[in-house]
Image (tube, rainbow, N blue to C red):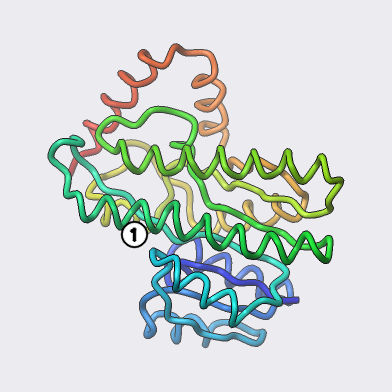
Amino acid sequence: MKALITGASSGIGKDMAKYLSKLGYDLVIVARRKELLEELSKELNTKVEIEVCDVSSASNCETLFEKYKDIDVLVNNAGFGTFGNFDETDLSTELNMINTNIVGLHVLTKLYLKEMVKRNSGHILNVGSLAGFMPGPLMATYYASKNYVVALSRGINKELSKKKSAVRVSILCPGPVDTNFNNVAGVKFGIKPLTSEYVAKYGIDGMFKNKEIIMPGVMNRATRILAKLVPWKVMAEGVYNTQKSKNK
């Protein structure tokens, strides 16, 4: 059994690699920073292949797929966010975010899903966010990218169920997690974040149970329910105030 994990050099991706290795999976760990991947490989007990790859490039994703077609578990974890008013944030950073959070995930999901459907087995875990269920003023592009991940994955699942396929796409949707994400995005958490170890294990376990939406944390699940009930404008106001308080 083999799993491929993008964004494996730190945070949730790193802890997913450790957990999957404990479960007996050989791994392909993918990220841009070779030295961090090499450090991680020393902590794993199963066979590990290191792939330095920027998944914001669709062609890089296609090359990655061609090299590692025989994958049983795909984890699309690579992603990042940025903070600020939409008219003030850097366009090139946002385009890179869109390419990483959406394009790379889209390409890898499509390519590996085709192979998995052919053999009628396999798991895909797309790392979304609680942000994928609500508007995101002050992090508009990031929230929109995670809305895309949720919508895409759920749409695919309906298609798979109609085909009676055994393949499923799961979406891990955490709220705040104690990783380097907040440093990259330039925000600080207003509530105590979950640990990446807990989120990683919760996500992998949920994926193997074929859960569609995997949302660790009671408060996060309550927030999702609230997002279903509260009008969009009211939710946007609440998110804006919360985000504003997180600005470093």
Task: Give the residue drawn at x 26%, y 55%.
Answer: 183
The image quarter containing residue 191 is top left
Q: Quadrant of the C terminus?
A: top left
- x and y percent of residue 179 in the render? 39, 57
For image coordinates 31% across by 36% down, the residue present is 140
Compared across the picture, whether 243 is left or right of 16 comes to left
Relative to 211, is 61 above or below?
A: below
- The quadrant of the picture occupied by the N terminus is bottom right
Q: Secondary structure at mark 1?
A: loop
| Residue 160 placement, left or right of 84 | right
**Residue 56 vertical placement versus 198 (above, below):** below
According to the picture, the residue beneath numbered tag 1 turns out to be: 180
Q: Amino acid at mark 1?
A: Asn
Kindly identify the residue that appears in the image at 63 percent across and 68 percent down. Answer: 19
Residue 37 in picture, x, y percent from top left: 45, 81
Q: Is residue 56 above or below residue 65?
A: above
Instruction: Look at 30% across and 51% down and name the residue there.
Output: 182
